[in-house]
Image (cartoon, helix red, strand yellow):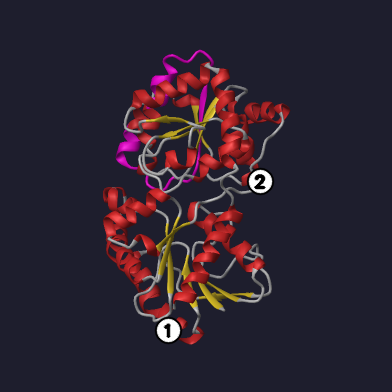
């Protein structure tokens, strides 16, 4: 088979959830199937850090596209021309972008429908593109893959897609996340938190991650905290909205909050392992990879009781109402004062993590590719 793949988000050093899904699945699929040809299509010169087997070749399709107008030009004009030239057996898009102007059988990976539920959280032209074009892509696609049963039901409910057309390919976790020694935890706490206990947030700083209420909950928690506990925030500031800014300005304990931007796997592993818990309470999530990263690192988890997060966490995390500051702060108090509860959750998290892996994800996505070609 000849398989063309949209890899515009495969940028080392800037991988988010979708980027990791793309990298982890494709690195496995291309290595396991040397009998097939894989063509990875980028919108800029691929990084020299990307290492793929000989049955893989890179194609750069300019211009770089990070704006809805450029997306339209790229996917509805330039990409169809390339696909007519390549004549692939299937076109796979791990990040959801597709084309309406090519007869090539397409597989669309939809990670979530956050733009349907919370359009106000996304810039105007971006949300218009998503809500109009992505829906049309889904109807045109031969098959759809998604990362949770929650997202599958969402796609069925809001877009009227047949459940038989949708495959669930749960996310996995980077193998670099693992248990660390007590000595390493001590060093990490000294380096990042002045030796004090801390809660850890990992993810982009965007509205649906519930950053404003997280700040409010930390403020409320600190009024009862006796251990000088800190909050470490790891992630890129994407949409620092007025609501987030207001919550930050009202925070009485700013000196106990530190921002660390993007960090590599090794540093993140240490931060997860040495934390009191991961504090990850979005009001919407298609999966929630940080939950698995925390489980694999031996950390307790506080997460939301809505959308996909209960599906991922099972009974291995404290589930809270993300719309309730009291619910979040009470969970923080419980884990900061109850070591037995924390240890129970850590052990449950280790067991829960074994149900998810990138190997399983890659196998599921490959089955989707095979089924698409057979159906075609």
Label annotation for residue 81: 1
Residue 373 visible to an observer of this rendering:
yes
Image spot of residue 230 (x, y percent) = 52, 25
Element type at marker 2?
A: loop
Q: Is residue 75 shown left or right of residue 369?
A: left
The residue that appears at 47% across and 15% down in the rendered structure is 225
Q: Do the residues labelled 1 and 2 touch (CB within 8 Å)?
A: no
Image spot of residue 57 (x, y percent) = 61, 75
Q: Is residue 52 shown left or right of residue 327?
A: right
How many numbered callouts? 2
Element type at marker 1?
A: helix
First along the sequence among labels 1 and 2: 1
The residue that appears at 30% across and 39% down in the rendered structure is 242
Image spot of residue 146 (x, y percent) = 43, 57
Q: Is residue 215 above or below residue 70?
A: above
Q: In which quarter of the image is the N terminus?
A: bottom right
Q: In which quarter of the image is residue 187?
A: top right
Residue 124 visible to an observer of this rendering:
no
Q: Is residue 271 shown left or right of residue 78?
A: right
Label annotation for residue 176: 2
The residue that appears at 36% across and 27% down in the rendered structure is 216
Residue 91 lies in the magenta stretch: no
| Crowd tier of the residue under label 2, counting other residues whose Cα lies within 10 Å: few below 14, some 14–19, many 20 or above | some
Q: In which quarter of the image is residue 329?
A: top left
Q: Is residue 196 above or below residue 290?
A: above
The residue that appears at 54% across and 46% down in the rendered structure is 262
Image spot of residue 48 (x, y percent) = 65, 66
In the rendered structure, which segment of residues is drawn in magenta? 217-246
Q: How far apart are marks 1 and 2 (CA)?
A: 40 Å
Residue nearest the viewer, comparing 322 with 59: 322
Residue nearest the viewer, comparing 60 with 56: 56
Q: Quadrant of the C terminus?
A: bottom left
């Amino acid at each position: 088979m000849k398989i063309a793949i949209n890899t515009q988000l495969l940028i080392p050093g800037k991988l988010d959830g979708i980027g990791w899904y793309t990298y982890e699945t494709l690195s496995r699929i291309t290595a396991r199937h040397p009998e097939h040809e894989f063509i990875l299509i980028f919108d800029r010169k691929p990084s020299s850090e990307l290492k793929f087997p000989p049955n893989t070749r890179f194609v750069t399709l300019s211009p770089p596209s990070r704006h809805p107008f450029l997306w339209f030009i790229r996917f509805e004009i330039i990409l169809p021309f390339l696909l007519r030239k390549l004549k692939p057996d299937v076109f796979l898009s791990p990040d959801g972008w597709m084309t309406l102007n090519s007869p090539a059988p397409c597989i669309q990976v939809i990670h979530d429908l956050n733009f349907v539920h919370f359009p106000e959280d996304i810039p105007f032209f971006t949300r218009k593109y998503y809500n109009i074009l992505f829906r049309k892509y889904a109807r045109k696609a031969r098959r759809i893959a998604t990362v949770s049963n929650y997202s599958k039901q969402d796609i069925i409910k809001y877009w009227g897609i047949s459940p038989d057309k949708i495959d669930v390919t749960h996310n996995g976790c980077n193998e670099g996340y693992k248990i660390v020694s007590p000595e390493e935890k001590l060093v990490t706490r000294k380096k990042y938190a002045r030796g004090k206990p801390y809660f850890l947030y990992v993810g982009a700083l965007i509205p649906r991650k519930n950053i404003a209420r997280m700040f409010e909950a930390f403020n409320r928690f600190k009024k009862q905290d006796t251990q000088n506990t800190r909050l470490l925030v790891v992630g890129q500031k994407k949409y620092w909205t007025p609501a987030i800014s207001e919550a930050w300005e009202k925070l009485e304990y700013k000196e106990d909050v530190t921002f660390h931007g993007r960090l590599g796997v090794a540093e993140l592993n240490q931060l997860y392992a040495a934390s009191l818990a991961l504090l990850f309470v979005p009001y919407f999530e298609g999966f929630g990879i940080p939950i698995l990263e925390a489980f694999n690192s031996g950390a307790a988890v506080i997460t939301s009781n809505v959308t996909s997060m209960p599906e991922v966490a099972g009974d291995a995390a404290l589930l809270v109402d993300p719309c309730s500051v009291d619910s979040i702060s009470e969970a923080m108090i419980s884990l900061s004062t109850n070591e037995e509860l924390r240890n129970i959750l850590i052990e449950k998290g280790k067991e829960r993590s074994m149900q998810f892996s990138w190997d399983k994800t890659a196998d599921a996505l490959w089955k989707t590719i095979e089924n698409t070609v057979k159906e075609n």
